[in-house]
Image (tube, rainbow, N blue to C red):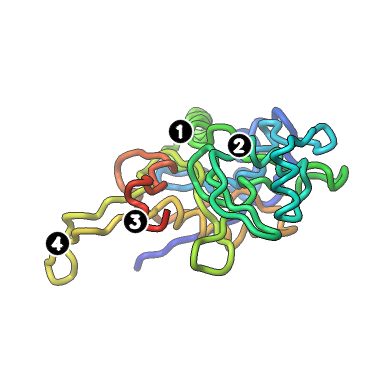
Amino acid sequence: MPQLTITALPGMPLIQQGDDLARLIVEALTRLNLTLQNNDVLVITSKIVSKAQGRRLDLRTVTPSAHAEEIAAQTDKDPRLVEVILNEAAEISRMRRGAIITRHKLGFISANAGIDHSNVGADGEDWILLLPVDPDGTARQLRDQLLAQTGAQAGIVISDTHGRPFRMGNVGTAIGSAGFPALWDLRGRPDLFNRQLQYTDIGLADELAAAADLLSGQANEGLPVTLIRGLQLPEGDGRASDLIRPPEMNLYR
């Protein structure tokens, strides 16, 4: 009987710049009497990765440009926040009152270039959190560190929460991954009636991020690391950036 278990790791401390996430994850597993195994997947929220990388920013240190002031007037946004959004984004995709949708420098589409105010810290509303630097590279580094500490070939997903075009509600989304194909190509495989699949690609890293988000949550849960066990991960390796649809294939751009 196929079975999948999803376990949030309690007891992770509030992450500070420079913290060793791999060590803290192993300690959290040990407290639960769990040992990391081959084919396990650890889903880690981008928020703690950003904090470990020192990606917190005080808006009081930001001087908005004239361009940021203009966009802020159109969207009812803080001009200082708009300035940071412009610095983090490759382009603005859409904007209206209360919303700025961007294509981040990492390639994906999200509101406000993925900048977050929630759970940033207790030291005021002026602090924001930027997305991690090179989340795919960070996922690879964490995987290598965990392999060295545990001997297990585990998959890593760094997740963020995104809205989706034409769909209501935010879901967990992979912005970094390592150890398995983030985009799982099933083309050429037979269906139940031996008909060959022709167009089936699975966003495996996104599916894992969404599953973990059911436990890690987006409010005060305090559960930023989730262990998914029971999968037989497909062979190969990939990156979350593999999930970004190339512009020439996007019919809605």
Q: Which mark is residue 68?
A: none
In terms of sequence position, does the residue under pointer 1 or pointer 3 come before the other? 1
Q: Amino acid at mark 4?
A: Gln
User: Seen in the image, is 226 located left or right of residue 199?
Assistant: right
User: What is the spatial separation of the Cα atoms under label 2 and label 1, in whole angstroms?
Assistant: 26 Å
Q: Amino acid at mark 1?
A: Gly
Q: Which residue is mark 2?
A: 132
Q: Which residue is mark 1?
A: 151
Query: Tag count in the figure?
Result: 4
User: What is the spatial separation of the Cα atoms under label 4 and label 3, in whole angstroms?
Assistant: 16 Å
Q: Secondary structure at mark 2?
A: loop
User: What is the spatial separation of the Cα atoms under label 1 and label 3, in whole angstroms?
Assistant: 28 Å
Q: Which mark is residue 196?
A: 4
Q: What residue is shown at x 18% (from left), y 57% (from top)? A: 189
User: What is the spatial separation of the Cα atoms under label 2 and label 3, in whole angstroms?
Assistant: 25 Å
Q: Quadrant of the N terminus?
A: bottom left
In terms of sequence position, does the residue under pointer 2 or pointer 3 come before the other? 2
